[in-house]
Amino acid sequence: MAASSPVPSLLLTLALALTVAAAGKISALRTPISRDIYHSSDSLLREIKALVARHSDKLSMDTITTSNKGYSADLLVVTFNHVKESVDNGSKSFGQHGRELITSEVALRLLYILTEKRKIAGVDFSSFERVLENLVIKVVPMENWNGRKRVEEGELCDRRNGRGVDLNRNWSVDWGKKEKDYDPYEENPGIAPFSEPEAQIMRELSRSFKPHIWVNVHSGMEALFMPYDHKNTTPNGASAHLMRSVLENLNHRHFQDSCLVGSGGGSVGYLAHGTTTDYMYDIAKVPMPFTFEIYGDEKASTDDCFKMFNPVDKTTFDRVINKWCMAFLILFEEGLRNLRDAQIVSRDTLDNWVPIGGDVVERNVARKTARERRKLEGLDLGMQELRTYFRLFMLSTFLLMFMFCTRISKNRNRDSGNVFDP
């Protein structure tokens, strides 16, 4: 990418992921949601909307709705742009899995820090001011609102969306492949890539915003992951070195080397197919797509999902939120420096940066022609569709050859019968 390219963009998608256990309702052995600590989904979104209204000079907001086969989803996208005349792109997504409530709480606190300078103990925010002036950040605080509702109603282990699909298995890279330990209740990939409205919206956001950094935020452990999730390896070349450098610097500088760093497929202990991060790297060509795992209680029972994925006391809750909000501020700094060093973004003034408005998703959706949409869909499905067509071609060829050979055999038998019949 040329040095005159726009400044780094960040998309933060806080993915709330809930693992679904066999029994749906809260049992005596399960820790209930700490409602004195955690916002409900409705109250959290109301608070974010109020924050946007108070800081319209820095924040803008879009609510995007789409549906598929009778199922609809709404996503709230908040854009932070310190200098409204110039906008750049970076993204974070929270709440992709319903049970990971802590991720959306981090999204809310981060927005407060960016706008109202909410304090983190011992942190001098003045050192980050210049960095924030050079970034545009999009935050999806609750990617899976329908799934989150299921969790609040008692399905504490559910990670899926409102119709039972794991949104982090519904993307097109290596979609649908099932490992030996595949659990259809946990990892249902949907009927096709991007069958789910939530994934469709997030894909459109990646296309229209074109972020330089994408962070998908989950809980279950503490880790800083880069691609790939679907195989036990990392990408080759300069891009892999760039991503690893950012994560290792963040891990050393902020976490004292306590986080796992590497590919999701090589570090977690299992492979995941059809994930957001792999799509962002292979298809959307985001220079630095990451998955952050921000909390996990290893001592919790596998059936005690709220405790496994979320802090249950106020002290730990505050510590986790402060630690990871600070981690994002450092990520902004490290990411911007590395992107500039690699000449992926410009070192020049803001005048050279490409402005993108808060309504970018809706505007770009409206502009796309049907032909452009079909072309993009074809690129997304890529080799998967080619493999399907090839299999159908081979099957059809085999059937035709079988029918042809059968006809020849019958003709030979008939001719042979004519010679020997009395």
Image (cartoon, helix red, strand yellow):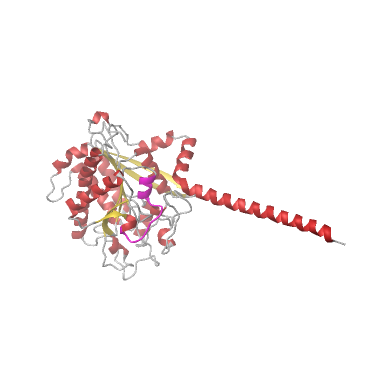
| Most distant residue in the bottom direction | 28
**Along the line of sight, the residue nearer the viewer: 144 or 125:** 125
Q: Position of residue 284 (x, y in %)?
A: 37, 42
Is 54 in front, or is 292?
Answer: 292
Q: Is residue 123 left or right of residue 296?
A: left
Q: Does 271 lie within the magenta span?
A: yes
- Where is the C terminus found, in terms of image quarters? bottom right
Q: Position of residue 162 (x, y in %)?
A: 42, 55
Q: Nearer the viewer, residue 124 or 150?
A: 124
Residue 186 position, x and y percent, is: 40, 61
Q: Is residue 91 visible?
A: no
The region drawn magenta spans 267-282
Residue 180 against residue 3 in the figure, above or below? below
Residue 9 appears in view: yes
Nearest to the observer: residue 184 or residue 176: 176
The N terminus: image quadrant: top left
Q: Residue at x 49, y 39 (%)?
A: 374
Q: Which picture quadrant has residue 189? A: bottom left
Percent coordinates x, y for residue 405 in the rendering: 68, 54
Q: Is residue 190 left or right of residue 269?
A: right
Asked if the stretch drawn in magenta spans residue 209, the answer is no
Q: Name, please, the residue furthest toward the front.
A: 419
Total tally of numbered discs in the picture: 0
Q: Residue furthest top?
A: 351
Q: Quadrant of residue 151?
A: bottom left
